[in-house]
Amino acid sequence: MLQMGDEVMYFSAVFLLLMLGTRSATWASVLTAFLYIFMVMFRFPPVPAEQAGRVMRPRAPSGGVPVVAHRGGCHDAPENTLAAIREASRNGATGAELDLSFTADGVPVLMHDETVDRTTNGSGAISKLSFVQLRRLDAAARHRLKDKFVGEKVPTLQEAVEECIRHQLTIIFNVKDQADKAAAVLHAMYNKFPALYNSSIVSSFEPKVIYKMRQTDPNVVTALTHRPWRLSRFSDGTPRTLSTWGQLWTGVLDVLLDWAHHHILWKLCGVSAIMVHKDFISQDYAQYWAERGVEVVGWTVNTAVEKDYYNNRLKIGYITDSLLEDCDPHY
């Protein structure tokens, strides 16, 4: 009943907006009906709640909420490496968030940035480097604990999956782009390791990535990642443009995108979770999504005070850069 009431409210709002835009009740009705039919015909149902629950609520060793190591725990070990996965498991994480990327010769590997400059002793775009070239680099070279992890390599996707399975860690596959290629590679990985259906989730800021993943394999648990004002501001809050008109325009787009995430995109993609920047999560916000059968996961939660809030007040899972100490966020 709640979701039916939601739909009546959403499409009533769409109708009113179209009325204002077209100044025609007929056209507003036709366009609203078209959008409704599109949603009914092309949306994906979420995976069964039992399956989503096994993925989103694995039993934490301490009995607390699920704790996911961001990029494998990038403060505690070199990010997106096998060493990070092992450290995350040793330090009590229930899962690891890993970033999918591709080399010039199409090998799926772990890398957050478009270039290797920030995390390795190499330089250049990962899309321009072959796997052989990438493998020669030291993935620990720029890390604060580089002396402890000398010679750590950039792993392939399969190596990382096998390491997570070995340590019984839930995996969050973070996909930034290349929806078709990512969906095909992940689908093959799920076929090779069927346990992933009950121990992993595919997430992205881009709805097209999630939609393509559900289209390729509707049995995969998925999540939309969201940060309000993402189009107009960087992660640290600074404006993306100094132009007044640019800020106004991107601000309008941010409002529309936020509305779409909360009212259309999650239902169209049939996601089981939404991963939201920690500064925008409250008890009411978590409850809003719980009533719709969607889990909320906060990122990036890096202080003891914040972690206590998630464990004891919000009682929802979170993603963190460190399981050992307070640290600044890694954007």
Image: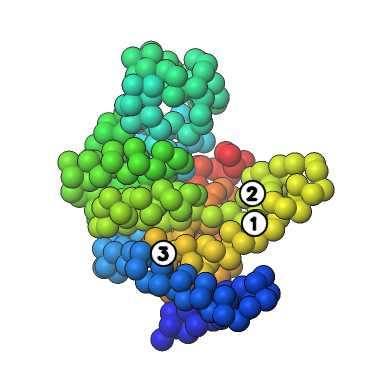
Measuring 34% from the left and 68% from the top, which residue is drawn there? 41
Would you call the spot at circle 2 few (<14 residues within 10 Å), some (14-19), or many (20 or more)? some
Q: Earlier in the sequence, mark 1 or mark 2?
A: 2
Residue 261 at what x, y percent from top left?
A: 52, 62
Q: Alpha carbon of mark 1 to alpha carbon of mark 2: how far?
A: 6 Å
What secondary structure is marked by label 2? loop
User: In which quadrant is the N terminus drawn?
Assistant: bottom left
State how the image is colored: rainbow
Q: Position of residue 166 (x, y in %)?
A: 23, 40
In the rendered image of this protein, does residue 98 appear above or below residue 212? above
Q: Is residue 144 left or right of residue 131?
A: right
Residue type at mark 2 is Leu
Q: Determine which of the numbered discs, if any, sits on residue 231 in the image.
A: 2
Could you tell whether 159 is left or right of 20 in the image? left
Residue placed under numbered mark 1 in the picture? 254
**Labelled pair 1, 2 in contact (Cβ < 8 Å):** yes
The residue pinned by badge 3 equals 268
- Seen at 55% across and 24% down, the residue is 118
